[in-house]
Amino acid sequence: QVQPVESGGGLVQAGGSLRLSCAASGRTFNNYDMGWFRQTPGKEREFVAVITWRGGSTYYADSVKGRFTISRDNAKNTVYLQMNSLDSEDTAVYYCALRSAGGYCYSANYDYWGRGTQVTVSS
């Protein structure tokens, strides 16, 4: 069993930056792609970014492309999401998840989920 735990959320002003971290305990996560999703009340969970387990490929939602960067450190079992130029539309609970197969932008294809970390961007 793998348990991802997110950290790094908080309150930031529009235009600011935050870096989220996700540490996975349990089995090594080297065979899993790591993704970030976000969710606001009343809306479905939204794909944000994913990085393949070898770290060679990254994919982003159009809404964050050019502002967010995903990276991972397999030695530390940790994935990061650097978020720059934040705006109020980025306010959400951010979830880290591990995926072994299937389309990367579909939450149903992720096997393990963290509990989320709140990001609030004030305008």
Image: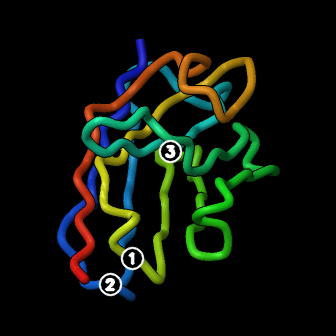
Residue at image x 58%, y 38%? 34
- Under mark 2, the amino acid is Ala
Quadrant occupied by the N terminus: top left
Residue 25 in which image quadrant: top left
**Is disc 2 surrounded by few (<14), some (14 to 19) or many (20+) residues within 10 Å?**
some
In terms of sequence position, does the residue under pointer 3 or pointer 2 come before the other? 2
Residue 14 in the figure: left or right of residue 37: left
Q: Residue furthest right?
A: 56
Q: Nearer the viewer, residue 32 or 88?
A: 88
Which kind of residue does numbered mark 3 sit on?
Answer: Trp
Q: Which residue is mark 3?
A: 36
| Residue 3 in sight from this viewpoint | yes
> How far apart are the alpha carbons under marks 2 and 1?
5 Å
Front in this rendered view, residue 123 or 16: 123
| Left or right position of 81 against 117 | right
Q: Earlier in the sequence, mark 1 or mark 3?
A: 3
Q: Which mark is residue 14?
A: 2
Residue 34 versus residue 120: which sits nearer the camera? 120
Q: In this rendering, does residue 77 appear at all? A: no
Mark whose residue sits in front, 3 or 2: 2
Q: Are marks 2 and 1 in contact (CB under 8 Å)?
A: yes
Q: Nearer the viewer, mark 1 or mark 3?
A: 1
Give the structural element (helix, strand or loop) at label 2.
loop
- Report the residue marked by disc 1: 87
Residue displayed at 56% across by 42% down: 47
